[in-house]
Every structure is written in structure tokens, then in C-alpha cells.
Image (cartoon, grey):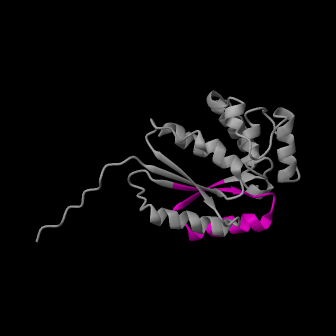
Amino acid sequence: MAKKQFYKRQRNPIILLVCEGKNKTERKYFSHYQVRESHYRLAIKDSEATDVMGMARRAANLYKEYQMDPEIGDLVFCLIDLDLRHDKYDAYLKAKQKYPQVRFIVSNPCFEIWLLYYFTENPKTESSSQAVKEQMKRYVPAYNEAMDVYDQCDLEDKYAVAINRSEKKNAFYEEEKILVERNPYTEVQDLILILKQH
């Protein structure tokens, strides 16, 4: 008996981003990557859960719901702020093991570290996420979490500079230094590189 052939309908890859529900900053920033001429379909989803495991679970459920297929190039990402907390870092390690289909984009203390790289080569080490947001105000005086920094500061063509600065800083850390002890630290550039190459 001949084997049945299953043909997959041709479609562009889906890239799903799961952000904390209360964080408008990430959603506004990444909405600028939802462009019609892209080779991928970008969907940005909020998570009611703000804990790492809850967000990872949401990402894994969306992976199933969207019937994502890694062979086509489908990817699901979870954006995590470590907030300098070891308990969040431990949860991130557990979530990575439990949900291997989910990729994690970690920032420490928070996502605004990535935004700072658009404005400075050396964001200062801060003792809290709130302090990082205050640092943003030195470069963008009206900055708040509801602001569309990408649009208002005309960041569209400046991502390469931010990537370069971020990678340079990350390379500076010793390999054995765990992520929660790297401050400032972000992996957002890894996601931007994927979005830009698709």
C-alpha cells in the first residue's frame, strides 16, 4: 500500500512574540516590525501572567493554537525582564527546560536596556528596572512606558548601531557570569536580527 503524501499549504513563517500584559513598551516597539512586505507574519501577544513560567506556558499554548511548524520557519519568543532577581532567573531556566519550543529573549534589568543602546554606547548599571527607565529620561525627557519611542525618536534606521553596541557589551561579560548578574544585559538584538533577515 502506497504511503499517503501530505502537502503543506505554502505560507509565510509566523513569528509570535509574547510580552507581559502590562508592558506597552515592547508591544509598541515591535509593532513597527509588522510590515506588509515582510517574509513573515509577526503576531504580538500579551500574557495575563507576569511570572516567567506563566508567560512560557502562554507561549507554548499559542504555539499549539497557531499550529506552528519549525520546518517552515515558525518561531515563538517570550520576552523576559529579569529585574535583577535570582528567582526570576531560576524560573527562566526551568521554563527553558519545560518548553523547548519557546525561545526566550532576556533583558536585565528590563527591556529599556535595549532602547538605551540607540542613544548610548554604555548604559549605566542600575539597581532596579525603574532606575533604567529614569536613565531613559536623560535621552528622551518625555519618556514613559506608553510612549512609542521608535516613532517619536525616529529609530527606524538606527537598529544596526544598537545591535553593535549591545553585542559589544555582551561580549565583555565572562562566560561563567550568569545572566541575572550581567547588568546591563539584553538579547533583543538576537530577535531583531531574525526579524530583519526574514
Answer yes or no: is residue 65 visible.
Answer: yes
Q: Is residue 125 visible?
A: no
57 sits left or right of 154 in the view: left
Q: Is residue 47 above or below residue 9?
A: below
Q: Position of residue 92 (x, y in %)?
A: 67, 64
| Vertical order, 14 against 171 (above or below) | below
Rendered image quadrant of residue 142? top right
Residue 120 position within the rendered picture, expressed as x and y whole percent measured from the top left: 79, 32
Above or below, 143 against 86 in this view is: above
The residue stretch that appears in magenta: 76-105
Whether residue 78 is in magenta: the answer is: yes
At 77% from the left edge and 57% from the top edge, which residue is drawn? 180
Viewer-nearest residue: 129 or 170 = 129
Q: Residue at x 42, y 56 (%)?
A: 70
Picture quadrant where residue 114 is located: top right
Identify which residue is drawn at 53% across, 37% down: 196
Q: Quadrant of the N terminus?
A: bottom left
Q: Nearer the viewer, residue 52 or 41?
A: 41
Give the percent coordinates (x, y) of residue 158: 66, 29
Is 181 or 132 nearer to us in this picture? 132
In the picture, measured across the screen, residue 40 lies left or right of residue 49, that is left
User: Where is residue 108 shown, x and y percent of the image?
Assistant: 76, 52
Indicate yes or no whether the magenta region holds residue 87: yes
Q: Nearer the viewer, residue 52 or 183?
A: 52
